[in-house]
Every structure is written in C-alpha cells, then in structure tokens.
Image: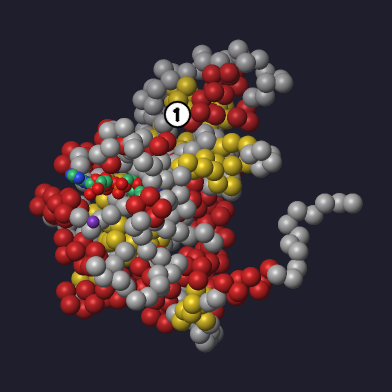
Amino acid sequence: MRILPETSRTFGEYLLLPNLTDETCTPDQVDLSAPLVRHPVGQQSPIRIATPMVSAIMGAVSSPRLAIALAQVGGLSFLHQNQPIDEQAAMVATVKRHKAGFRHNDVNIKPSATLHEADLLINESRQDVIVVTDDGTPSGRFLGLITSRDYNFHRHQPNDSVQSRMLPLADLVTAPRGTSLEQANSLLWDSRQDVLPVLDTTGQLTALVQRRDYELHEQFRTESVDDDKRFRVGAGINTRDYQDRIPALVEAGADVLCLDSSDGFSVWQQRAVTFVRERYGDTVRIGAGNVVDARGFRYLADAGADFVKVGIGGGSICITRDQKGIGRGQATALAEIVPARDAYAEKTDMYVPVCSDGGIIHDSHMAVALAFGADFLMLGRYFARFDESPSPKVRGAGGQILKEYWGEGSARARNAARYGQGDMVFEEGVDGYVNYSGALADSVKVTLTKLRSTMISCGSTSLRQFHETAVLEAVSQQTFVQNSEEVDRNDRPTVV
Ligand SMILES: NC(=O)C1=CN([C@@H]2O[C@H](COP(=O)(O)OP(=O)(O)OC[C@H]3O[C@@H](n4cnc5c(N)ncnc54)[C@H](O)[C@@H]3O)[C@@H](O)[C@H]2O)C=CC1
Ligand SMILES: O=c1[nH]c(=O)c2[nH+]cn([C@@H]3O[C@H](COP(=O)(O)O)[C@@H](O)[C@H]3O)c2[nH]1
Ligand SMILES: [K+]
C-alpha cells in the first residue's frame, strides 16, 4: 500500500493569472486547433481539429445529427458503441455520406403521400426539408421538396397530398454537380430559396445545400472534414467484440476509433490497440483510456495508442467514485499526465495527445483544462443539452425545458453485459436531466469566444503557447464565495 502525499484537485479549484498581452494577441489571431492523434515531434498530426472539443462516447450524446453539427464547427463526435455493430456502423456511414455544405438526401416521400405523413416524417427525422421522389426512395426520380413551411393544418387538410403543396422541380432553381459552395450560396441568394438541390446530368438529386449550413461555414470556416470533404467522425469501441466491430467501423468510414472504458490501464486495451496496429498499421487511428496517472499513460502510449484519454469519476453523471472508490481529481490527473506526455515525446520523438474527459461544468473549466496541458476535451453534459443530441426534450416541473442525460454505467444504458454482471448488480452512472440549450453552434460560438478571451489575457495565440506559458494557482473555496456573497442575484426579476 502507498498513500500519495498530495490531495487531488479538480478544475474548479484553480484560476489562471494573466500574462502580458501584446498587440499581436487579438481574438482573430487565436488558433484553437489541436492534434487529435500521435505524430512525430515537429510534424503535424495527420488529423487535427480546429475546435478542441469532442463529444462523449455516450448514447445520450453522440448521434449522426450531433456528429455533423459538431464537425461543422470544427470538433468531432465519437458515436457510441453500446449498440449492435451494424447499427453503429450505419451511424458512421450516415455521417460520412454528408460533405461539408452538401447534405446527403436521406429523408424521402412520395408525391401521393398525405401532408399528415409528411408532417410526421419531418418531425421524426428532425429535418427542415424532405425530398419528394416518384417512389419515395432516395434513388427515385427527383420531383420536388417539401418543408414544414409549405403547409399549415389551419389552412390545409391533413389528407391533402404532398404533391398539392410541394415545391415542384420545375419551380426550383437547381445547380449542377460540381458546383462550389460559394457558387451554391450565390444561387441561394439569387433564387431566394432556403435550399438548393444539386443534380447530376440525368436529373438525379446528388445533394442539398441549405442556407443555414452555408452560414455556419462562413462563421466557422473550419469544418472537420477528410480529404474528400466528407465530415469526420469517430467511433467508440470496447475490449470485447473489437475484432468484429473495428473492421465494420473502418469499412463504414470511421476516421478514428476510441476505446471506451472507465479504466484503460488493462491488458485488454493493450490487446485491442495491438490488434489495430497488426491489422491496419497506421492507417487506422485508435485512442485509449481512461487513465489518471503517468503509469497508465505510458502503458497505453507504449501499446501504440494514438491518443490517451484521462478521467475517472469526474463526469457529471459519474458515481464511480462512490461505487468503486476509484478516481482522481481531474486537474491533478492532468498535472501528472501532461509532463509524462512531454517526457514521452522527448524520449521517443512521438507526441501522443492527451484528451481530458469529463467534469467540465463551466466554460471556464475548459480554459483551465487546456491550461493544464490537455490537447483536447471530451464533453458529455455540455453536448447533451443541445437540439442535435439524440435524447428526448422534456418539460420540468417548473416549466423549464430539459433534455434527458444518462451515464453509460446507468441502468438505462443497459450496459450490463460489459460489467460481467449478467443482470446489472450495481449502477455506475446517473440517469437525469440537463437544461436544454438550443442549437449546438450557438453555444459553441459563445464558448470559443470566452476561450479566446482567456487566452488573450494569458498572452497566448495558440494552445501550444498556452500550455507552455499559462500560470495556474489553486484558490480557496472562499475565493468563489466572495463573488456572490453580498449581492442577491437578479436572475429572475418579478415585476411588482
Ligand atoms: N470515465 C469514467 O469515470 C467512467 C466511465 N464509465 C463509462 O461506462 C461504460 C462502461 O465502462 P466500464 O465499466 O469501465 O466497462 P469495461 O467493459 O471497460 O470494463 C468492465 C469490466 O470488464 C473487464 N473487461 C474488459 N474487457 C474484458 C475482456 N476482454 N475480458 C475480460 N474482462 C474484460 C474490465 O477489466 C472491467 O472489470 C463506458 O462507456 C465508460 O466510459 C463508467 C464509469 C466511470
Ligand atoms: O462514472 C460514470 N458513470 C457513467 O455511467 C458514465 N457514463 C459516462 N461517463 C464518463 O463521463 C464522461 C462525460 O462527463 P461530463 O458529462 O462531465 O462531460 C464520459 O465521457 C465518460 O468518460 C461515466 N462515468
Ligand atoms: K486497471
């Protein structure tokens, strides 16, 4: 037995001190891009992300819809692996069908269908627009578009046909295949359409360009895309069925894999990484984890992991610390692992990025985690709150809108087999709610603006510089109490 001398600490116990801000240090100069996978020191990582945020490998968080929304703003999703292999592979394939700015058409209806059926389909698929084809399949002849703005059940009968309200092809401005995103945007403005169909020479629909997608492209200009401009997407795997799951995910086009476990310091993970290296060399990328100390980091880096994920028990839905007595304050875990990463790079000439997973409660904690040296962050609660996450939106007792959010170790996730428990004997996660927060892109924009402001105060225009120069200090609990002690918050004013 060994007792470590220090108390482990979490993000909320630290604040940053400013460094000198000079005239070159302005928000437009801040580069938040991060390496996703291992690379020789001094070279670029073969996969970089412009926004150092990835979504958690969780059923309540990562879906194709969220993956596209997150890739659009420069991050990356990891689709969850607590589902049959073919279903997860189909999710990966769904994301890979979409090119940045050019949506693949995957929701179709026949012209003879009713408006009621169209309405159900629009709500169910959560799409703004659905495509009318002669036989109602994606390969059918393209006839027109229908959106929720084309009908209103006060004016139109639910039994009226789609044909009676659709925008027919003859009235639509279309673009030929090969049209650039800039050209497509001009056509959208000239035609005053919200959606531009892109057709091949035979009149077959190949893609849709939506006004909102172009606006996001203009705002962020940093989509996570592969060489074919398809959105990048990651996929979780486990240490049991990886020999079957990995080939299916690779075949479906996954850009990067990640072992999903509360405890990565195991021979099971070493074997899974070795399987990838032996079968695919460096053409398939795989992260491993989670670990909380330098021993765990080195073990996985030596095994060949492409990045190492850090964090046990710090997640918002985590009860692993209560249930198993295992975990570590996330700040302390990073404070030990980041120097181990840098020493590993020095010794082996190979930089293995570190992902900080879980425990981000406020946006300021992202700045603290990155200041501690994390290359990028994995977030569950943060993304679960958005429109694009797969979980249901519900109304709370006080009337507020909530989204359901549950841990992968909760009974709801039905992960029992992986615990070797047969019927689940104990739970390791919470099944709860988070506040609904609208569209992902809107919140990410605010978060990134805050992050840039922090970095400017700390005199940094890149994450690498931030890692090297940030000055952190542990603060007393009183420091945070001080801010709120004497003034009553005016959060919910009541008119009297
Ligand atoms: N980051 C965190 O603090 C936590 C995360 N979670 C999440 O819950 C889910 C379940 O995580 P875990 O319980 O760690 O699942 P896991 O499947 O990685 O591990 C469960 C148990 O199975 C054993 N095991 C794994 N592969 C094996 C193999 N091939 N043969 C024999 N035994 C094997 C492990 O040693 C462990 O005892 C994951 O999604 C994880 O991310 C759960 C708790 C805490
Ligand atoms: O103790 C746990 N029980 C669970 O059921 C569970 N599910 C997920 N996770 C981990 O929490 C991370 C997300 O954390 P946040 O919501 O704080 O971003 C995730 O990325 C995981 O590392 C769990 N931890
Ligand atoms: K272990």
Q: Would residue 259 be seen by someone viewing this image from the given angle?
A: yes
User: What residue do we see at 54% from left, 61% from top?
Assistant: 362
Q: Which residue is at a point 40% across and 72% down the rendered structure image? A: 7
Going 60% across and 12% down the picture, which residue do you hit?
A: 159
Mark 1 packing: few (<14 Cα in 10 Å), some, or many (20+)?
some
Residue 211: image location, x then y, percent:
55, 45
Furthest residue toward right: 496
The amino acid beneath tag 1 is Val
| Along the viewing direction, whichever of 121 and 455 lies nearer the viewer | 455
Asked which secondary structure carries label 1, the reply is loop
The image's colouring method is: secondary structure
Quadrant containing ligand 3 reads bottom left
Name the one closer to the observer, 425 or 229. 425
Q: Residue 136: give x, y in percent of width and height.
A: 43, 20
The quarter of the rendered structure image containing the N terminus is bottom left
Q: Position of residue 158 (x, y in %)?
A: 62, 16
Q: Which of 47/376 is in front?
A: 376
- Please say whether residue 76 is visible from this viewpoint: no
- How many numbered tags mark residues here? 1
Task: State the image coordinates of residue 190 (x, y, percent, origin top left).
Answer: 59, 44
Question: Residue reaching furthest front?
Answer: 1
Q: Residue at x 43, y 73 (%)?
A: 371
Is label 1 within 8 A of ligand 2 (CB to nearest ligand atom)?
A: no
Please tell me in which quadrant of the rendered image residue 247 appears: top left
User: Which residue has dot 1 on it?
Assistant: 107
Q: Classify 234 as above or below 91.
A: below
